[in-house]
Image (spheres, coloured by chain):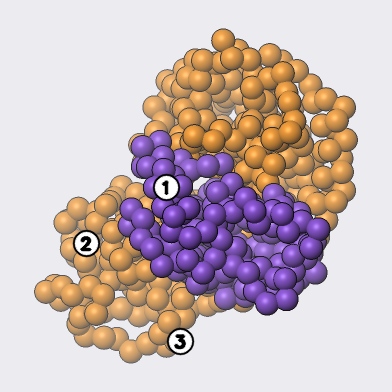
Chain colours: A orange, B purple
Amino acid sequence: MTRWRLLIDDSADAATGLATDEALMLPYGRTARSEYAATLRLYSYRSHAALVGRFQSLDGEIDLAVAARHGIDVGRRPTGGGAIVMGEDQLGVAVATRAPAASTPRALLARYADGIIAGLATLGIAAESAGKNDLQVGGRKIAGLGLHVDERGALLFHASVLADLNVDLMLDVLKIPGAKLADKPAERVQQRITTVAEQLGRPVPVSEVRAAVAAGFRSALGVELQPDEPSADECDRRDSLVRDRYAKDAWTQQRTHLRDAHGTALLKTPEGLARIYVATHGATIKSAFVTGDFNTLPDELVALEAQLRWTPATPSAVTAAVHDTVDDDALGVSPNVLAAAVWEATERALGVAGGAHPVRPSGSCYFPDGDARPAIRSTTSTNEAELV
Amino acid sequence: MIEIAGYELRLDRLYDPATHMWVQLQEGCRARIGLDPLSSETSGDVVALSLVEPGTIVAQGESVGDLEAAKFVGPLVSPVTGTVDEVNRDVLLEPALLNRDPATNWLVTVALDPSTRHELDAFLSGAEQLRPWFTVEVDRFRTQGAIAE
């Protein structure tokens, strides 16, 4: 049986937590050797740490004044994806190993996700891969995944599993376009996110989720987990990474060349008025959020939001995402009409069409459709990133 | 230019089988580098990237930047040793160019270190060398879902 190393720790601050993960890649570069095939670290952050993805804008994603007021650490991950809030109720999962030659990032994500899925299954929770890199339960996100490979060929798989979540705090700290403007915003977020505690109907300590995920890796990947501690070399590497990267503004406050922006569109439907928020990062949709007069957001639209994340901001990609997730009767409008509204919001975020827009009575060059076009109004705002 | 299994490879440059990068020699012992078409495709939709600043000294195999595709972040590995003297701001501002036209949209230009010119000897060029290598790589990608690390 393949031997892995298992590391467990809690209460990491943002810089130390991130630096430890990267330090664990040390024995897995091309010229390095480890007696273990991989290292699995199951850990938690000290409440709380708000972490942005590798290329995100820190102040574009996190309300830094609110974070300071709550005493929340901030940090930048080496992996991609969106901003998250970590703390004592979220399990961090890190796998460090040698990047195998005969595998793709997508396949590797799926492989390590299987360990988490199997772990949640031991708790009676049926999670599955969905969206770009999410694990979902009944269409609601319970874990996010990411992957980083360094130039030495070492691989780091990252995941955050929600044992529980303080949604109000998350809404306070993270800048999620549209979320705070929704009626009952916490309820709206809870339609999109679930936790182990909610699924089991009782408080669940992160230690219980950790034990389950460890069991999941053992069974799904067929590995033996040997409890261990970081080596002296890894601790030295961790300390130098904290000092030289993760605690430095040059890394945390790093700006990308890409412009963050968001746009909105209103869609009149038989179910009520829907407002669609689309946030872009360069020419990519980083998030989408649908709110409206309806009591409960249809599951299909929750799935659409997930499908749109990290999708190219192009009419064809938007159309494909809508048709992949939405049936004919969602909100009582055709997929083409919905796609047109999503694209309108996207287009405004991209700034393609400029600021204020007249209501166009019908038709779109991107979505030729016989349906009557809904009245659309929109707004645009941007968070222009500075050049590095 | 030749076409191999649906991919277009320009013949005015060298290709590094180890990194799947192309190297186009310029005047003054300089080289422009970029992704070959298979590398571009296997990266998926490029969301963002970073490149080192001009003046950075890189050794063969070291990173000249990172790219993010979906949630995967990986290094852009230099096939040559030298000093980066120019970076392509266009791809920083519009990373999707690397998917749309990887042959035109270069990453950085490197002033080559004369003492490491031998690195170029391992690169492939011309239809006779490129066709068998790239055919095998495409086949590997389509059957195994992976290319050389």
2 or 3: tag closer to the N-terminus: 2
Quarter occupied by residue A335: bottom left
Q: Residue at x 59, y 14 (%)?
A: A2
Pointers 2 and 3 in contact (CB under 8 A)? Answer: no
Question: Helix, strand, or loop for circle 1?
Answer: helix
Per the model, the C-alpha gap separating discs 1 and 2 is 46 Å
- Residue A342, above or below A240: below
Q: Which residue is mark 2?
A: A335
- Residue A109, above or below A213: below
Q: Residue at x 55, y 49 (%)?
A: B17
Instruction: Describe residue B94's horizontal placement relative to residue B1 as left or right.
Output: right
- Mark 2: amino acid: Pro
Q: Residue at x 28, y 59 (%)?
A: A320
Tell me where residue B45 appears, x and y as whole percent: 45, 58
Q: Nearer the viewer, mark 1 or mark 2?
A: 1
Q: Which residue is mark 3?
A: A355
Seen from the viewer's position, the closer of residues A165 and A336 is A336
Q: Nearer the viewer, mark 3 or mark 1?
A: 1
Pointers 3 and 1 in contact (CB under 8 A)? Answer: no
Instruction: Describe residue A172's horizontal placement relative to residue B111 as left or right.
Output: left
- Mark 1: amino acid: Pro
Q: Which residue is mark 1?
A: B132
Seen from the viewer's position, the closer of residues A192 and B33 is B33
Q: Residue furthest front?
A: B128
Seen from the viewer's position, the closer of residues B116 and A12 is B116
